[in-house]
Amino acid sequence: MKISENTNVAMPIKNMVGIIVAVAMGIFAYTEVTARLTSLETSRELMNSDLLKKSEQTTTDKEQYLLLEDLYETVEKHQELLDKNIHTQVMLDHIEAQLKKALEDIEDLKDKVRQNGTSH
C-alpha cells in the first residue's frame, strides 16, 4: 500500500469527533496542570523570600535580644537572693524562738534565786 498526499481515508464522523474531543481534553488538562505548577512555584518563591526577610535580624531585634538576656540574668540573681533571704528568715525565726525560751528560762532562774534569797 502506497501512502501519498492524495491518499483518501474514510472515517466515520463519530470517530473523528471522538478524536477531536480527546485532543481538546488533553490540551485542557495540560493547560490546567501547567497553571497549577506555575502557581505552586510562585507560592514557594514568595514563601522563601518572606522567610529570608524574616530571618534577617535588624539592629532593634539584636538590642531586644540583649535586653532580654540581661533581664533573665537579673531575674536569676534576684531569685537566688530571694532564696537566701527565705533561708535567713527561717533561721531568724528559729533564733527568735530560742531567744524567747532563753529569756523565759532566765526569768525563771531569777525568780528561783529571789525565792531562795528571801527564804534564807
Image (spheres, grey):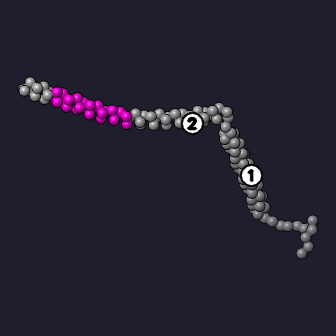
Q: Give the residues in magenta.
A: 87-110
* Residue at image coords 68%, 39%: 56
The residue positioned 13% from the left and 25% from the top of the image is 114
Q: Residues within 10 Å of mark 1 (few under 14, many from 20)?
A: few
Quarter of the figure with the N terminus: bottom right
Residue 79, percent from left and from top: 45, 36
In 3D space, how far apart are the residues under numbered discs 2 and 1 (Cα atoms)?
50 Å
**4 left or right of 80 in image:** right
Residue extending farthest to the bottom is: 1
Name the N-terminal-most of marks 2 and 1.
1
Based on the picture, tell me whether residue 64 belongs to the magenta stretch: no
Location of residue 2 with respect to 57 vertically, above or below: below
Q: Which residue is mark 2?
A: 69
Q: Amino acid at mark 1?
A: Thr
Query: Dot 1: what SS?
Result: helix
- Residue occupying the far right of the picture: 5
- Residue 75 is situated, as x and y percent measured from the top left of the image, at 49, 34
Quarter of the view holding residue 51 = top right
The quadrant of the rendering that contains the C terminus is: top left
Indicate the amino acid at tag 2: Glu
Residue at 49% of width from left, 35% of height from top? 77
6, above or below 101, in the image: below
Query: Camera-side residue: 58 or 36?
Result: 58
Q: Which residue is pictured at 90% across the width and 68% down the height?
A: 7
Side of 26 where 87 appears, left or right: left
Task: Residue under label 1, please give it.
Answer: 34
Q: Position of residue 71 (x, y in %)?
A: 54, 33
Q: Looking at the image, can residue 21 be seen?
A: no
Identify the main secondary structure in magenta.
helix
Query: Does dot 2 land on a helix, a strand or a loop?
Result: helix
Quarter-wise, where is residue 83 in the image? top left
Q: Looking at the picture, does residue 56 appear above or below residue 108? A: below
